[in-house]
């Protein structure tokens, strides 16, 4: 019964989230042998101003990047 | 000094959150012997579109459920 | 389908963990209206040397405390 | 630069972990458009006695299951 | 490649977040010997109504505090 | 009352952990205005075989690195 948490910059579409959950769950079930029904995925949309990389806020460092 | 984190679908009322914090903290103190004042609880309201179960988004799978 | 995570100093007995899971799950189900079967609890045993409080390691600050 | 955390019962082999990291990272990069090099995956091996499901410890509820 | 997560009451300014990321990353690099570029910091703004301390919601217990 | 969680490859000494907790707590108190006593830091020692970067296990990718 794996629990998977994905932290990612906000801005993903519902279509991307749907595919992310579908694929990660299916592949995790296949690789680990767990039942698909026992797998949970939680996506956390993180603002770029709340994410630091290399000592800088991503909102400062990557103002125009989406990914 | 336990730290407890509760991930739950968004939509809980303040009354439910208040009782959840009160009861979980009190019971954890009783069972573990920690002082009540040393217990922290953080609630994370998760959108159903950010929660996957069995490979599907909960917003697709349980569109009308609240819990 | 709440997911609850409890970080606590290592040293809890299996009896304490069993009661913690039982009570927290049951009370969360009662308060939120979620089904008991949909509730998961993960306990993380944390060494006192990995836990800082007020700027000090708990292994330094509370060398003899168990809770 | 997604960060992905996988909580799973302990007992996965290094071969399973390697494939899990490889596949989840590659698929996340493909779906989100992030660079593969910016993706991190952390696996947390959780003992069954530290994982509760439906109010019971998994070590009690599923003593013989591996997944 | 440390990953640091800071949970804090919401209300920090961008200036505070910027300094927090800068200083924590730099000091972690210095103390651990990791490269600054390999350090990530994620800030989670938590509402006081989602944070319990000593069995009470912080929105009840500290209605006027900001920190 | 910030809670800070540091995930880092295992192998840090107690001296490094002590300094990490001391400095991060002090600087967080200074920048945010929170009381030092209200700050908690939890360090999670992560095995390199449980940490993936760019689709590879760190135990494969960086077999000789310590940081």
Image (spheres, coloured by chain):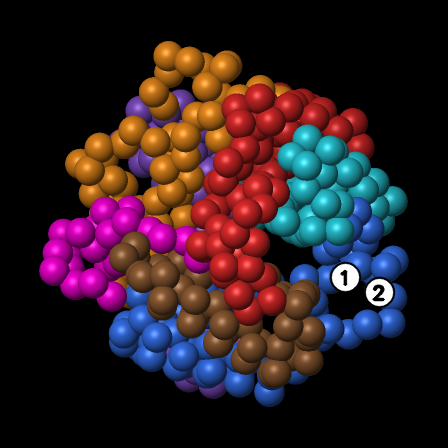
Chain colours: A purple, B cyan, C red, D orange, E blue, F brown
Range of residues picked out in magenta: F43-67
Picture quarter containing residue F64?
bottom left
The chain containing the residue under callout 2 comes to: E
Q: Residue at x 50, y 14 (%)?
A: D61
Vertical comparison of B15 with C41: above or below: below
**From the viewer's perspective, is E54 left or right of E63?**
left
Vertical comparison of B44 with E26: above or below: above
Vertical comparison of A3 with A5: above or below: above
* Image location (x, y in percent) of residue C19: 64, 24
Image depth: mark 1 or mark 2 in front: 2
Q: Quadrant of the C terminus of chain B?
A: top right
Which one is in front, E29 or E45? Answer: E29
Q: What numbered label is drawn on residue E48?
A: 1
* Image location (x, y in percent) of residue C8: 56, 43
Which one is in front, F46 or A36? Answer: F46
Q: Secondary structure at mark 1?
A: helix
Characterize the local packing of mark 1: few (<14), some (14-19) or many (20 or more) Cα atoms within 10 angstroms: many
The chain containing the residue under callout 1 comes to: E
Q: What numbered label is drawn on residue E65?
A: none
Q: Residue at x 45, y 55 (%)?
A: C50
Residue D52: say if magenta. Answer: no
Q: CA distance from mark 1 to mark 2?
A: 8 Å
**Do the CB atoms of the residues marked 1 and 2 lie less than 8 Å apart?**
yes
* Image location (x, y in percent) of residue A23: 37, 40
* Image location (x, y in percent) of residue A13: 51, 57
Which one is in front, C50 or D29? Answer: C50
Q: Secondary structure at mark 2?
A: loop
Residue B55 visible (yes or no): no
Report the number of numbered marks. 2
- In primary-sequence order, the first of circles 1 and 2 is 1
């Amino acid at each position: 019964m794996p629990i998977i948490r994905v932290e990612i910059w906000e801005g993903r579409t519902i279509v991307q989230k749907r595919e992310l959950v579908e694929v990660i769950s299916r592949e995790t079930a296949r690789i680990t042998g767990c039942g698909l029904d026992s797998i949970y995925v939680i996506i956390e949309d993180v603002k770029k101003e709340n994410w630091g990389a290399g000592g800088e806020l991503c909102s400062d460092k990557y103002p125009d990047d989406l990914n």
